[in-house]
Amino acid sequence: MITSLSLLNYVDMDSEQSVLGYGISLIVLNGMMYVGIPMFAIVIGKKRL
């Protein structure tokens, strides 16, 4: 999660809208990494049994 937050150091944020957009996209990215991928693996694992 900290690594994904460090991505904000490399983008040019010049308005509140861009900060909000980058923040929402990072929340979605973290959600997919910590919830989406494990759920996908569980579903695929159950289908193979």
Image: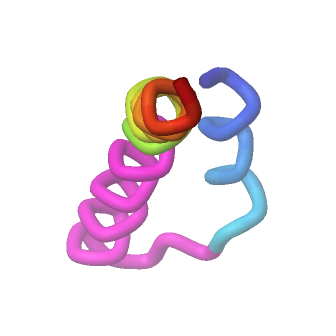
* 37 relative to 31 in the view: left or right: right
**Nearer to the camera, 32 or 38:** 38
**Nearer to the camera, 2 or 12:** 2
Residue 33 pos. (x, y %): 55, 36
Q: Dividing the picture into quarters, in which one does residue 2 lie?
A: top right
Q: Is residue 29 magenta?
A: yes
Q: Main secondary structure of the magenta part?
A: helix
Q: Residue at x 41, y 63 (%)?
A: 22
Residue 18 pos. (x, y %): 35, 75
* 16 relative to 11 in the view: left or right: left
Q: Residue at x 66, y 69 (%)?
A: 11
Q: Dividing the picture into quarters, in which one does residue 31 lie?
A: top left
Q: Residue at x 49, y 71 (%)?
A: 13
The magenta stretch is 12-30
Residue 44 pos. (x, y %): 52, 39
| Looking at the image, residue 36 lies above or below residue 49 | below
* 11 relative to 24 in the view: left or right: right
